[in-house]
Amino acid sequence: MHGIAIPFIERFRREIKFLRPLAYYPLVDNVSDAEINIAPGHEGSNDATITGATPNQDGQVGPAYSFDGIDDEITHAVTDDFSPTNDISVVVIFKLGADGVDNASSQPLVVAKYWKIHVRTTNNLVQWRFDNAGAVVAAHTLGNGDRNWHIGVGTYDNSDGSNSVMKIYIDGVIRQTTNAAKLASTTYIQSIGKISPVFFNGYIQHVALFDKVLTEDEVLRLAQYADLAD
């Protein structure tokens, strides 16, 4: 007897939800002004407001939203209920529409008050960056002109309270590990696709925030389910 095949997009959604995020924005549905948080136990809380970004574009795991690099953004309400400060993981699937430039606001993907994932320099250096006690970065270079889909994951492990560790994964592989200071409070996602006054140019989907450190196996499984494992 054959089992029922689970559609590609639904399989990925189920895997994200199984990992119990605080917030999960698939960014695959054709809506005009609001993206619903579908994280289990948090449905409809801390929903996002969509301004300008265009839905139903060709994506990696279902349709994606495109961002024009001019004024498209997705913003979130301010709430400490979605502010992990000990352990953090952030997931985003993206494709660049333009190369980065060499500044700390270039090509913003997912942004909070004290951390962000963004892409800078013309060699497209993906940075998982903390700025609460001086800039600390874990990064990986995609290369000039890269226009492929990628899944990026940033993790922050503060389990012992002193020797915090940041890791960046691209396409299921750890690319860099670095030490970091303890993260300050107020770490909810503020925006997707914007660090004022800079906007992202490209495509984004499946943004998720966790109050735990995803394991290497969990990150690899997400990359495999997205058909992006390196």
Image (tube, helix red, strand yellow):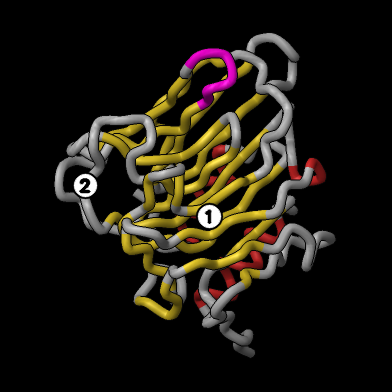
Rendering coords of residue 210 (x, y %): 68, 45
**Which residue position is annotated with label 2?**
99
Residue pictured at 61% horizontal, 53% vertical: 208
- Give the labeled residue for mark 1: 222
Horizontal and vertical percent for residue 226? 45, 62
Q: What residue is rendered at 70% in x and 61% in y?
A: 17
Helix, strand or loop status at disc 1: helix
Q: Which residues are magenta?
A: 130-134
| Mark number displayed over residue 3 | none
Q: Is residue 225 above or below residue 80?
A: below
Q: Is residue 131 magenta?
A: yes
| Looking at the image, residue 54 lies above or below residue 113 | below
Identify the residue at image location x=46%, y=22%.
177
Q: Is residue 161 above or below residue 113?
A: above
Q: Nearer the viewer, residue 65 or 92?
A: 65
Callout 2: helix, strand or loop? loop
Q: Would you identify the image quadrant in which residue 124 lies?
A: top left
Amino acid residing under circle 2: Asp
